[in-house]
Image (tube, rainbow, N blue to C red):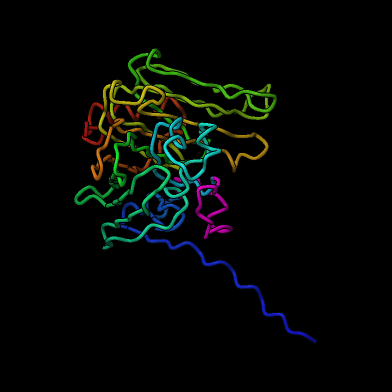
Amino acid sequence: MLFSPPLLAEAEVTRIPLNNGTVTIEITPDIGGRVLSASLVDKPNFLHIGAAVESDPNPSVTPESNNIAYFGHETWVGPQSQWWVHQLLNPQRAAAKAVWPPDPFLILAKNTVQGKNAQQIILQSPNSPVSGVVMQKTFSLVEDKPNQIRLDVTAQNIRDSKIAWDIWFNTRVPHTTNVYVPVASMSDVRVEHFTDATYGPLEHNFSDGLFALENFSPSTHQGRKGKVFIQPAQGWMAAFRDQQLLIIQFALQPKSAIHPEQGQIELYQEFLAASPEEGLLELEVHAPYRSLKPRETMLATEIWTILPYNNVQTPAAQRAFLRELVTKSSVLAPL
């Protein structure tokens, strides 16, 4: 009788934690160099993570690779319409001006660890022949501010000719998360509904200077799908779930600095009522769109503040909590 040795499981992704006793974050240099978890200590992960983190930890990275639903927090370049236009390695995607998938060399490839200590980890992506950039990402616990995490991303032009991109932060959370964005008026908001026989339009509301995306199930469809493009009035957005509040801060930009196809803040929502655990909400921030000379770099930063929220879990109570933070706290001071 022939003996068949057991199949070896694929290696797991590397997980590097940072923990200051108040907040904890887990970063992987694998699968694009992304954040897998962020929360208050002893609270549930605020982020939405896909099963592929466990089932497909070593993806193939080629110009033909497709997106894999790892989720968590990752970094793209924008605008989306230009993702495949400035490369020759995949002529089919170039000719089609493909808007999906994102650059495999930025979202799937292993990053190298450039530095690591108890407070900080620095990752570097490979040089991307698709986007023409190399990214360095620094994740830091903020000294003397135990509820804060700082994310710094540098993108450098590796080509011998000019390129033009923005740095695009994308943070995925469950679709049941309540999100609020400060907005001067609804004229600063553009909503695109991706409706069909399955997905109904997005639902939202605006009052007291805060735009909110609704997450209840529609009565006429199986779920919702769509995207919101926002020019915010202040440099932050706030999200509530699991007795936690995540505030994402960034440097507020004039509308002219953001590529006209994008918004400085974008919210993407997709869910089916029959499988709520797979529902997705993306909290996206674009940095200014810039032209880079060869070897020139640009930098973008997000500050995450994670606070406990044990008040009533209603939109009215959450809005009141945010108004109090704006008026009485330095948490939402401009960057």
Q: Position of residue 291 (x, y in %)?
A: 28, 33
Looking at the image, residue 223 sits to the left or right of residue 252; the answer is right
Q: Nearer the viewer, residue 279 or 191?
A: 191
In this view of the protein, can residue 148 be seen by the observer?
A: no
Q: Position of residue 183 (x, y in %)?
A: 35, 20
Residue lying at the far bottom of the rendered structure: 1
Mostly what secondary structure, the magenta segment?
loop
Q: Is residue 119 above or below residue 306?
A: below
The quarter holding residue 232 reads top left
Looking at the image, residue 308 sits to the left or right of residue 277; the answer is left
* Magenta run includes residue 54: yes
The quarter holding residue 294 reads top left
Position of the C terminus, as image quadrant, is: top left
Residue lying at the far right of the rendered structure: 1
The quarter holding residue 120 reads bottom left
Q: Residue at x 59, y 34 (%)?
A: 271
Q: Nearer the viewer, residue 117 or 220?
A: 117
Q: Nearer the viewer, residue 89 or 316?
A: 89
Q: Residue at x 41, y 18 (%)?
A: 189
Magenta-colored span: 45-66
Q: Position of residue 61 (x, y in %)?
A: 50, 54
Count of picture labels: 0
Position of the N terminus, as image quadrant, is: bottom right
Q: Is residue 180 above or below residue 122?
A: above
In this view of the protein, can residue 17 be seen by the observer?
A: yes
* Magenta run includes residue 8: no
Q: Residue at x 57, y 38 (%)?
A: 279
Q: Is residue 159 above or below residue 20?
A: above
Q: Position of residue 53 (x, y in %)?
A: 53, 55
